[in-house]
């Protein structure tokens, strides 16, 4: 069984790769720089160098694949994320069709069902559509807000603050990327189903940012002040961090599109609920800050 894993050094992809190795599979790690791969895994996986936005390279890298774990690669700060999503979507759809890949697990997001009006997530919705159009078996994993996004605000958390443009009383699905990797690996090993399927990965709880701040404070032993900032200030901060205007629009568009009455179409149930709590994750990853 030949399983190709993209973004194998990312929060989710690295977990998928480890679990496949533990299951006795020798997966294929598709990445730009094989030197970034975990040294302990290099002798246990096959590495293939490829740019995921290069359709020809992806087609060659996935030749002979039975199953594929696909994550759209992040866009560079000076690039347009929507163009990046479009190229990645075209590349994976061509590879699935040309190589007859029997089953693809795609890491999508809560909100992709909107298709339009959710910023960067719109690109994931269009990738869902591109994979659906191949007619091959595909599972879209619609994940919630990653715990690891908090690491991008390490400096704020060191100062016991958590600024956010999201409404402080809006419940959201929060999830540990490691748990997403668990679900993805289990699905890859279980194999194809029948056509197109969707599975949400919602984490253990729906949390507001106000609740998240309290939980993080309890885990780190500090009182964390959660502050809602304006959209203009959020955009200004993204620009100051070096993001190009299209990138700012894509990031800001996510909260603009999902914070005003949006309800995920995938309900919380036993299949969408994962175990790791924000408190446990914060104790392990944020307390040292």
Image (cartoon, rainbow, N blue to C red):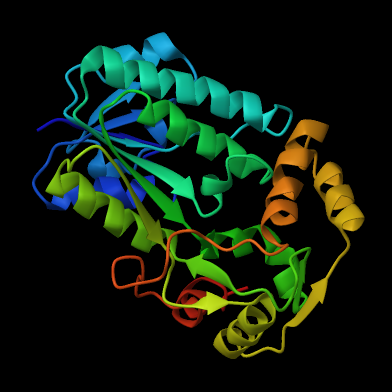
Look at 28% across and 27% down and name the residue there: 47
Residue 82 located left or right of residue 285: right
Provide residue 197's location: percent of width, then percent of height: 30, 46
Provide residue 137's location: percent of width, then percent of height: 24, 34
Residue 11 located left or right of residue 261: left
Dividing the picture into quadrants, the one containing residue 207 is bottom right
Relative height, residue 174 to residue 66 (above, below): below
Provide residue 175's location: percent of width, then percent of height: 46, 66
Q: Residue extending furthest top?
A: 56
Relative height, residue 173 to residue 128 (above, below): below
Relative height, residue 202 to residue 236 (above, below): below
Provide residue 48's location: percent of width, then percent of height: 30, 22
Tell me the quadrant of the picture where the N terminus can be found: top left
Tell me the quadrant of the picture where the C terminus can be found: bottom right
Look at 50% across and 60% down and name the residue there: 144
Look at 43% across and 38% down and name the residue there: 71
- Is residue 33 shown to the viewer in this render? no
């Amino acid at each position: 069984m030949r399983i190709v894993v993209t973004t194998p050094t990312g929060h989710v992809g690295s977990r998928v790769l480890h679990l496949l190795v533990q299951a006795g599979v020798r997966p294929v790690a598709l990445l730009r720089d094989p030197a970034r791969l975990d040294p302990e895994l290099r002798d246990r996986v096959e590495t293939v160098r490829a740019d995921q936005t290069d359709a020809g390279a992806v087609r060659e890298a996935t030749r002979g694949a039975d199953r594929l774990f696909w994550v759209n690669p992040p866009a560079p700060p000076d690039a347009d994320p929507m163009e990046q999503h479009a190229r990645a979507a075209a590349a994976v759809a061509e590879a699935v069709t040309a190589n007859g890949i029997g089953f693809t697990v795609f890491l999508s997001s809560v909100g992709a069902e909107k298709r339009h009006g959710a910023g960067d997530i719109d690109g994931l919705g269009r990738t869902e559509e591109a994979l659906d159009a191949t007619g091959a078996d595909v599972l879209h994993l619609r994940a919630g807000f990653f715990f690891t996004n908090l690491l991008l605000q390490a400096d704020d958390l060191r100062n016991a603050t958590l600024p956010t443009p999201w409404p402080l009383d809006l419940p959201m699905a929060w999830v540990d990327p490691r748990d997403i990797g668990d679900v993805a690996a289990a699905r890859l090993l279980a194999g194809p189903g029948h056509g197109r399927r969707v599975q949400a990965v919602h984490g253990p709880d729906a949390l507001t940012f106000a609740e998240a701040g309290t939980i993080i404070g309890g885990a780190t032993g500090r009182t964390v002040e959660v502050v809602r900032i304006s959209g203009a200030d959020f955009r200004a901060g993204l620009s100051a961090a070096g993001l190009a205007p299209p990138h700012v629009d894509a990031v800001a568009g996510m909260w603009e599109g999902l914070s005003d009455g949006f309800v995920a179409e995938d309900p919380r149930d036993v299949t969408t609920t994962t175990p790791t709590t924000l408190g446990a994750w914060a104790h392990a990853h944020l307390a040292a800050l």
